[in-house]
Amino acid sequence: MTSADETTSPQRQKGLDMMSKVYGWEMSDGPGDFFAHTADQVFGEVWTREGLSVRDRRLILLGALAQAGQIDVAEIQAGAALSNGELTPEQLEEISLFLCYYVGWPLGTKMHFMFGNVISKHEKTQQK
């Protein structure tokens, strides 16, 4: 969890804490309106709502990112899911096959190869 200082609002701290939980690394405050909306609204409100777990939200997000062809952003999510123990390598492989039928073979294939790279990186870090 991040530590609040006297300039961090409770809403911002809530968002930073959730960002740290979602991505698995310490998240510090950032400048500007874009970061403020990301931390305060996306992570401080949407990701903290009851009803879905972080894993559930991540699965939904991976599907949406696959459909949009946002493989680079999906890579961050897949790596965090592995690091946080939310998904296994086998589950990521199954997700890519499943997605092929719903987002199309070309996008599903991109996800498949990206997941393979993420899994390889994850396995290398686990061996250290």
Image (cartoon, rainbow, N blue to C red):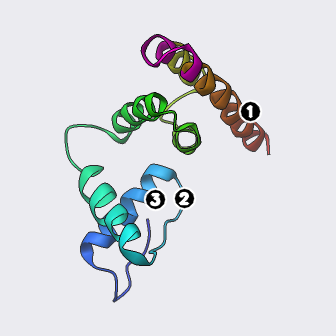
User: Is residue 13 covered in magenta?
Assistant: no
Please state if 35 lies on the left or on the right of 14 as rendered.
right
Horizontal and vertical percent for residue 31? Answer: 44, 78
Which region shows up in magenta?
A: 98-107
Please state if 91 lies on the left or on the right of 54 as rendered.
right
Residue placed at 54% from the left, 59% from the top?
25
Q: CA distance from mark 2 to mark 3?
A: 5 Å
Q: Which residue is mark 1?
A: 120
Q: Which residue is mark 3?
A: 20
- Tell me the tag on residue 39: none
The amino acid pointed to by label 1 is Ser
Which mark sits nearer the N-terminus, 3 or 1?
3
Secondary structure state at the residue bearing disc 3? helix
Q: Which residue is mark 2?
A: 25
The amino acid pointed to by label 3 is Ser
Secondary structure state at the residue bearing disc 2? loop
